[in-house]
Image: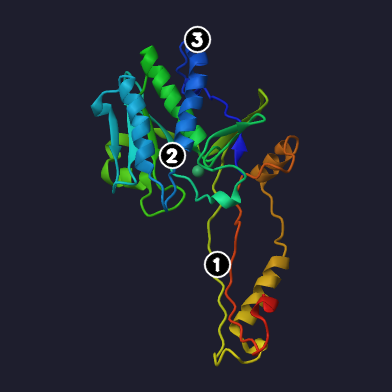
């Protein structure tokens, strides 16, 4: 279950652009960030049945209302469900633009696997619940709230600030960053990018716990397991069956412990995070369901229910 407390990161400090004496706007940004966060969580942006464009347009509506000109605000993508939103705050041009990035899509979520509706924003006991609260609609909300605040302040940074909230980072065939680079690179061209998906900020009950910055990405590999034998009629004894061999292989794999390998970064991360992890905060999404099909031939007179 994804849950976390939103900490409104004041990106002004990050980008070296914090105007002094704007404490009130900072305070106003917190409820606004929460409101945007709720709005985004409650828009289903899964690949299967969701719609990223709805979320992109919700963000664009807020930016437009805050005074972003049409030329500085784009909602575009390869099809009606996968549009990205890009916005720009103009700076003096002294330095090259900075791109601030998050994605709008989320991993699939089945209602029966959750204790709450994954597309309903719930705050309970100091935690937020809902698909995307951790990955990464919190980051998207933080960026939008800050862009609205900076626009309201009329702040002119020494470089253009570009906001890009994109489709299909989690899956699907229309990765927003790739699409923008291929079709509208000029919209997002920047000296460097801060990707809110590449790190994490966490606070609990008002206490700031950590600010993490991702140093590298794990290598993604899929292995498909397949066993073969000459085949034959499915009423033949089980040991001749490819399923039997595959099941045996999976059982051996399940019992196998991969050797622990640490490098300088992972060792430091584990040492530092051991102090505040209680074992209940899974940052990854583990498979919640696996399925195999075994074809059975049951003697006449046997009850199939007894076999299953
Ligand atoms: Zn993500």
Residue 98 in the image: x percent, y percent? 39, 29
Which of the two discs, 3 and 2, sits closer to the camera? 2
Earlier in the chain: of badge 3 and badge 2, it is 3
Residue 263 in the image: x percent, y percent? 66, 48
Q: Residue at x 53, y 35 (%)?
A: 121
Given residues 19 and 5, the one toward you in this image is 5
As measured in the structure, the alpha-carbon distance from the residue carrying label 3 to the one carrying label 1 is 53 Å
Judge whether 87 appears above or below 198 on screen: above
Q: Residue at x 59, y 64 (%)?
A: 290
Q: Is mark 3 on a helix, strand or loop?
A: helix
Disc on res. 191: none
Residue highlighted by disc 2: 43
Q: Is mark 2 on a helix, strand or loop?
A: loop
Determine the image quadrant of residue 230.
bottom right
Earlier in the chain: of badge 3 and badge 1, it is 3
Q: Residue at x 51, y 20 (%)?
A: 31
Q: How many C-alpha atoms fall within 10 Å of the one at disc 3: few (<14), some, or many (≥20)?
A: few
Residue highlighted by disc 3: 24
Given residues 183 and 283, the one toward you in this image is 283
The answer to whether the beta carbon of the residue marked 3 is less than 8 Å from any atom of ligand 1 is no
Residue highlighted by disc 1: 223
């Amino acid at each position: 279950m994804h849950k976390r407390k939103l900490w409104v990161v004041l990106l002004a400090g990050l980008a070296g652009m914090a105007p002094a004496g704007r404490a009130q706007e900072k305070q106003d940004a917190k409820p606004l960030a929460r409101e945007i966060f709720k709005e985004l969580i409650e828009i289903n942006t899964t690949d299967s049945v969701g719609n990223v464009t709805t979320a992109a347009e919700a963000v664009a509506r807020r930016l437009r209302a805050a005074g972003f000109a049409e030329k500085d605000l784009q909602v575009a993508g390869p099809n009606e469900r996968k549009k990205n939103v890009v916005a720009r705050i103009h700076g003096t041009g002294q330095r090259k633009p900075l791109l601030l990035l998050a994605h709008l899509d989320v991993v699939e979520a089945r209602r029966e696997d959750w204790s709450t509706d994954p597309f309903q924003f719930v705050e309970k006991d100091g935690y937020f619940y809902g698909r995307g609260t951790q990955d990464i609609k919190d980051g998207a909300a933080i960026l939008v709230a800050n862009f609205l605040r900076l626009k309201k302040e009329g702040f002119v940074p020494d470089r253009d600030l570009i906001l890009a909230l994109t489709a299909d980072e989690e899956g699907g065939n229309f990765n927003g960053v790739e699409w923008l680079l291929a079709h509208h690179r000029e919209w997002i061209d920047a000296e460097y990018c801060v990707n809110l998906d590449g790190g994490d900020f966490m606070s609990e009950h008002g206490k700031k716990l950590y600010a993490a910055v991702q140093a590298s990405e794990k290598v993604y590999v899929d292995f498909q397991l397949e066993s073969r034998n000459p085949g034959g009629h499915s009423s033949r004894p089980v040991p001749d069956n490819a399923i039997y061999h595959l099941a045996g292989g999976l059982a051996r794999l399940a019992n196998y412990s991969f050797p622990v390998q640490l490098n300088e970064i992972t060792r430091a991360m584990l040492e530092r995070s051991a102090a505040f992890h209680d074992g209940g905060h899974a940052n990854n999404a583990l498979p919640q369901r696996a399925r195999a099909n075994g074809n059975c031939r049951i003697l006449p007179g046997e009850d199939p229910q007894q076999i299953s």
